[in-house]
Amino acid sequence: MRKSKIMKNQNGLSFIATIFLVLVIAVLVFGVVYFVRIQYAKETLEDLKTDMLLVQAKVKTISSEYILEEKDEVLKGTKLSEMKDNTIIQKFLEKELFDPDKKGKKYYVWDQNILQEQELNQVTLEEGAYYIVEYTENEVYYTKGFTYADGNTYYEISDIEQLEAAE
């Protein structure tokens, strides 16, 4: 009996104060998680943009060589027409971002091996991803794309550059 009187006299956190403390901690945790996710998305976007710009710079160099020599052997990668049976390429082409059969366009697929051959070792592709490059317009596409905070997925370097400018 004596213990119960001692317990009643001890001051501790009231039930309402405990709930309030738990809510404050929960808000702080959710805030930190949200901030970390935003930062991660920004860094992922910046990494992808940098990789695509490096690929585009190499494509411009190769394209200049092609203009001088006018030989398809100068163009690096696998012709897109030769990879249309690849399921990843098929799914990408179903998005109809460009017309792969347009006259005068030169679409090629770059994988990790081509990147290494072009001394772009710092550029890494995710498993099952490719860059599709177009040599006449120097455009670069990423088959996996980047899903932005607005829920849309972007594949083309010019679109991804605009995303960063819109932040």
Image (tube, rainbow, N blue to C red):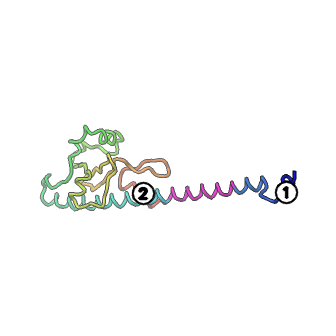
Q: Are marks 1 and 2 in contact (CB under 8 Å)?
A: no
Main SS category, magenta section: helix
In the image, which is nearer the foreground, mark 1 or mark 2?
Answer: 1
Give left or right: position of 66 versus 95: left
* Image spot of residue 29 (x, y percent): 60, 56
Identify residue for label 1. Answer: 6
Element type at mark 1? helix
The answer to whether residue 25 is magenta is yes
Residue type at numbered disc 1: Ile
- Residues rendered magenta in the picture: 22-38
Q: Nearer the viewer, residue 45 or 155?
A: 45
Is the residue 30 above or below the residue 98 in the image? below
Mark 1 vs 2, N-terminal side: 1
- Label 1 Cα crowd, 10 Å radius (few <14 / some 14-19 / many 20+): few
Out of 50 and 35, give the one closest to the viewer. Answer: 35
What residue appears at the point 78 percent right and 58 percent down from the top-left corner? 12
* Other residues around mark 2 within 10 Å, as few (<14) / some (14–19) / many (≥20): few
Residue at (14, 52) in percent of width and height = 72
Say left or right for 29 vs 69. Answer: right
Q: Residue at 77% x, 57% y: name it.
A: 13
Rendered image: mark on residue 44: 2
- Indicate the position of residue 167 as horizontal and vertical percent values: 49, 60
Q: Amino acid at mark 2?
A: Thr
Q: How many marks?
A: 2
State left or right for residue 156 relative to residue 150: left
Q: Which mark is residue 69?
A: none
Query: How far separated are the C-alphas under marks 1 and 2?
Result: 58 Å
